[in-house]
Amino acid sequence: MKNYFYFAIGSCRMEDYELESFGLFEAGVLSLEEIEAERDSDIAFKFYTENEEERDRIVAEFSHLNFECGKEEARDWDLWWRERQTPVKVSESLWVRPPWVDFSAPNSGDTVLELEAKTAFGTGEHDSTAMTAQLMENVDFTGKSVLDIGTGTGILSLFALKKGAGFTVQTEIDPLTIPCLVENFEQNKETPNAVLGFLDSFSEKAKFNIIVCNMIRTEVLPLRTDIERLLAPNGNFILSGQLECEKHFILDWFKEAGFAVSEEIVREEWWAVRAC
């Protein structure tokens, strides 16, 4: 026996929508989906219920909205979402695919990572992550030590390892990301070196050839002193997650710290930079 969701589609004048939607929610509607209306002066909307009786009760109470009723076969929404996931081309040679999607990169030298975000950030779809990976393309990681600040899913550390990094260290302040991080490393046959805490937990002797960081300005600027301390002489610092309109804050910092800009990328409102 098939299960169904029951729906009703109605409309009202644009100026009446706020009041009508309030009444519908009071009557038991859990959500309203706005859809295209026949007239520009109207707003059309659709709601679902799990049974026919509940839908018909609400429709009768709001008969002036001229609802049209119907039903749709109930879906496994998680399965529906998973079936529509596709590989993401993050940068010139980096692809990310969900673990359940079969995919082979078109070029033999490309990197394909298996990632699932779950409780962490970073699957390559956001411009800030993609720009970081793009800047990483022009850096020699062979045998280098890498610090990944605010690692999230671990995508940047994993890319560095696939590009030949000697070792990577990941930092996070959110404990909920760690299980996801560990799972992603295991999925990609790598071993994480995760540090749950702030950069001041590193000793004064710690140095990294490359530091990558995809964090907004208000999060990264308080870390300036530690970043300067942890970056090895002639090392590369790759920073993303910055709004282009605010890049002067970062450039002022670089000038004070003696960092020279090697490469910049802009996508939409986002800005990323590589400095040394």
Image (cartoon, rainbow, N blue to C red):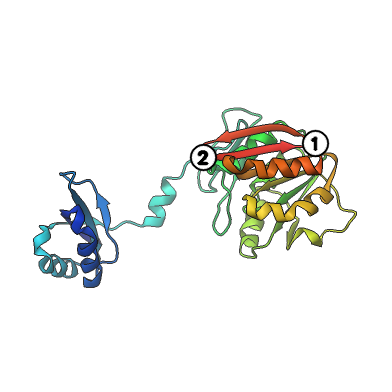
Ranked by sequence position, the earlier of labels 1 and 2 is 2
Quadrant (top left, top right, bottom left, bottom right) of the C terminus: top right
State the residue lying farthest toward the top: 107
Q: Is residue 150 visible?
A: no
| Residue at position x 29%, y 66% in the image | 30
Q: Nearer the viewer, residue 170 or 21?
A: 21
49 w.r.t. 272: above or below:
below
Say which amino acid is labelled 2: Pro
Say which amino acid is labelled 1: Thr
User: Quadrant of the rendered structure where residue 192 is?
Assistant: bottom right
Along the horizontal axis of the image, is 155 left or right of 82? right
**Few, some or many residues within 10 Å of mark 2 (<14, 14–19, 20+):** many
**The disc label shown at residue 142, or none:** 1
| Residue at position x 75%, y 41% in the image | 254
Q: Which residue is mark 2?
A: 87
26 w.r.t. 165: above or below:
below
Quadrant (top left, top right, bottom left, bottom right) of the N terminus: bottom left
Q: Nearer the viewer, residue 76 or 139?
A: 139
Q: Which element carries disc 2, helix, strand or loop?
A: loop
Q: Is residue 33 visible?
A: yes
